[in-house]
Amino acid sequence: MGTPLSELTTIGVGGVPAELIECRSRDDLIENALAVWRTGEDWLILGGGSNLVVADEVPELHVIRVANKGIEKLGDGHVRVQAGENWDALVELAVNSGWGGIESLSGIPGTVGAAPVQNIGAYGQEVSTVITRLEFLDYKTRETVILSKDELQFGYRDSIFKRGRIGLITWVEFQFATDLPAGSTALMKQRREEVLEQRAGKGMVLNPADPDTRSCGSFFMNPIVPDRIARTLPFEAPRWETEADDGLTVKLSAAWLIENAGIPKGFQIAGSGAAISSKHCLAITNRGGATAMDVLQLKTFVQERVAARWAIPLVPEPNLIGFQGELD
């Protein structure tokens, strides 16, 4: 019996795939992806497994695990990073080198190659601001292509890869801020420690001793709604301007909507191994022995409760793999 994906995902659910191929170099990654694609079978690109919920039964799934490592310095604050590098290790390197732009993205689990896909962000920073280009193996053409920042069409937790551009990322280039005032490195180190502490307090930094960290992190995106919808909410409901800053759309707090729809921290459906985090309402956690269906059931319950109370849909952040029929 092969390795279950529950052992390779941060939420700890997922069945045994048909095949698990670990790729430790760019060339190995490309060669194996092309080979799997030629079969026509179902496939999955797996990085750190932090933004993923895989079904309990996936016997026909072929998994390509991205494990290529390496950081090449191209200039001052300009680096090319292989897709399998640990994201937080890159943040630590940048901060210690005095390069600005991602210190508030400390503690986010996963790999560098996964970061552009959903344009990871936190505490006012997004990875899109420091990405210059990346190499992409296109599923449709079976060829590699260099995509510039503009071609990636970044948005809030969004990119071209979430809108139909299928394939895999082999490496990413970053240009960090280097022309910073004196004392900036110390301030960035302090900011990194503050963010790590904040995330740990919310159960968002992986810790085997803390079941609240057995999750995908934030499970739902903060919804962006028309201003007229936001004005129907109570005054105390958190809201922020959107990137468009046009006065027509508003970003809301998914955590506030969930908690004020009557779903408290620690909520658990009877008999389920999945629960809302005891630290904040935005994470679905594996309290021990949860199945993927437990997670899916709780996800649906939250969405239905919020829609019934506020008439606002919640969209999951993680990729849901192998649930075709169950998502209908």
Image: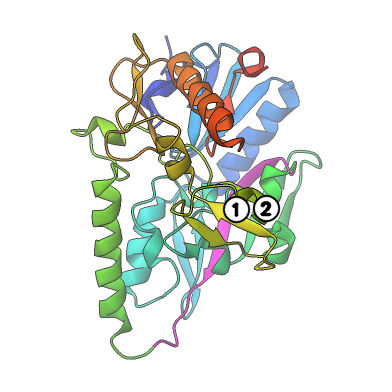
Q: Which residue is disc 2 drawn over?
A: 228
- Between 63 and 235, the residue placed more toward the observer is 235
Q: Where is residue 274 in the image (x, y as percent from the top left)?
A: 36, 21
Q: Which residue is disc 1 drawn over?
A: 231
For the residues labelled 1 and 2, the Cα–Cα distance comes to 5 Å
Q: Mark 1: few, some, or many residues within 10 Å (few <14, many ≥20)?
A: few
Residue segment shown in magenta: 165-180
Do the CB atoms of the residues marked 1 and 2 lie less than 8 Å apart?
Answer: yes
Asked if residue 174 is among those painted magenta in the image, a careful observer would answer: yes
Helix, strand or loop at mark 2: helix
Query: Residue placed at 67% from the left, 43% from the top?
Result: 162
Query: Residue placed at 36% from the left, 16% from the top?
Result: 290
Q: Eyeballing the image, is 205 above or below 292?
A: below
Quick check: 80 left or right of 7? right
Name the quadrant containing residue 260: top left
For this orientation, the residue located farthest to the right is: 141
Where the C terminus falls, by quadrant?
A: top right
Asked if residue 77 is among those painted magenta in the image, a careful observer would answer: no
Q: Eyeballing the image, is 177 above or below 287?
A: below
Q: Where is residue 127 in the image (x, y as percent from the top left)?
A: 52, 61
Q: Position of residue 76 (x, y in %)?
A: 47, 81
Name the quadrant containing residue 12: top left
